[in-house]
Amino acid sequence: MTGTSYEAWITHLFDHPDEQPEWYFLPEYELIKISPSCLVDHVLTLFDAPALLMTRFSDQQIASGLKYLIDNGCGGDLGLFAHSSVGDEARLALAERIDRVYAQIFAARCTPALGHLSEVPDQPLNMLCYMWWDIICLDPTRNTKSDRLLHEALIEAMGRTLALPHAACQEGALHGLGHWGDAAPERTEALIGTYLAENRAARPELAAYAMAARGGCVL
């Protein structure tokens, strides 16, 4: 099944009962067989218009499928983008699209709860929104230039998310900038500085969190 269709792949990721949020740990789970080039194409297609997931799947299904995709502890298929067979063009295309999950899904479905304050809403997407950049499995490629280009592009994706007028999304972006800021310190400082100077915090507590992100000290 190395040529697994996009529809079959989407079904594999998201079409599971809500009462089985960790379906990827069940004994009967079978790893789907898909070629690296096919997987790259499918991932880029998914992130091109992630809002389409909301027309077919529940919030729990979306949260579980996305976590499987980005988290090494669950599946981590996104880690393929660090493989030497994947070129810079595909990696940068991913960075250009990946924040659409925030703009199209998290901003639409998440509550304005803040994870770093241990606010726990009854919404499965919130924790993923908060932890996205912490758990995402985009490891270094061992190519210094490729890593720099990707990491700088991801910082820009976090910056676009920080511009969204949604508390949970802003927190997720600041969390990411706090962890990834060393990849582009001047740009990270500029993004957070503008956010603070323009008083764009969707909740007052986010101003303090932005200051923590500035110093790379985020929970």
Image: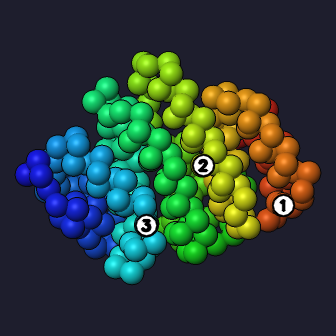
Residue at horizontal 43 percent and vertical 66 percent from the top? 50
Q: Position of residue 4 (x, y in %)?
A: 14, 56
Q: Position of residue 194 (x, y in %)?
A: 85, 48
Question: Considering only order in the chain, which callout, 1 or 2, is on the residue closer to the N terminus?
Answer: 2
Residue at horizontal 36 percent and vertical 76 percent from the top? 57
Q: Residues within 10 Å of mark 3 (few under 14, many from 20)?
A: some
Q: Position of residue 17 (x, y in %)?
A: 28, 73
SS at mark 1?
loop
SS at mark 2?
helix
Q: Which mark is residue 49?
A: 3
Q: Given the image, on which type of amino acid does mark 3 rest?
A: Ala
- Name which quarter of the figure residue 8 lies in: bottom left
Residue 88 visible at all: yes
Residue at horizontal 55 percent and vertical 55 percent from the top? 99
SS at mark 3?
loop
Q: Is residue 215 left or right of residue 71?
A: right
Residue 58 visible at all: no
Q: CA distance from mark 2 to mark 1?
A: 17 Å
Q: Given the image, on which type of amino acid does mark 1 rest?
A: Arg
Q: Quadrant of the C terminus?
A: top right
Question: Considering only order in the chain, which callout, 3 or 1, is on the residue closer to the N terminus?
Answer: 3
Question: In the image, which is nearer the foreground, mark 2 or mark 1?
Answer: 2
Name the residue nearer the viewer: 25 or 184: 184
Outermost front residue: 89
**Circle 1 sits on which residue?**
200
Q: Which mark is residue 157?
A: 2
Q: Position of residue 131 (x, y in %)?
A: 56, 50
Q: CA distance from mark 2 to mark 3?
A: 15 Å
Q: Is residue 113 left or right of residue 110?
A: right
Q: CA distance from mark 1 to mark 3?
A: 26 Å
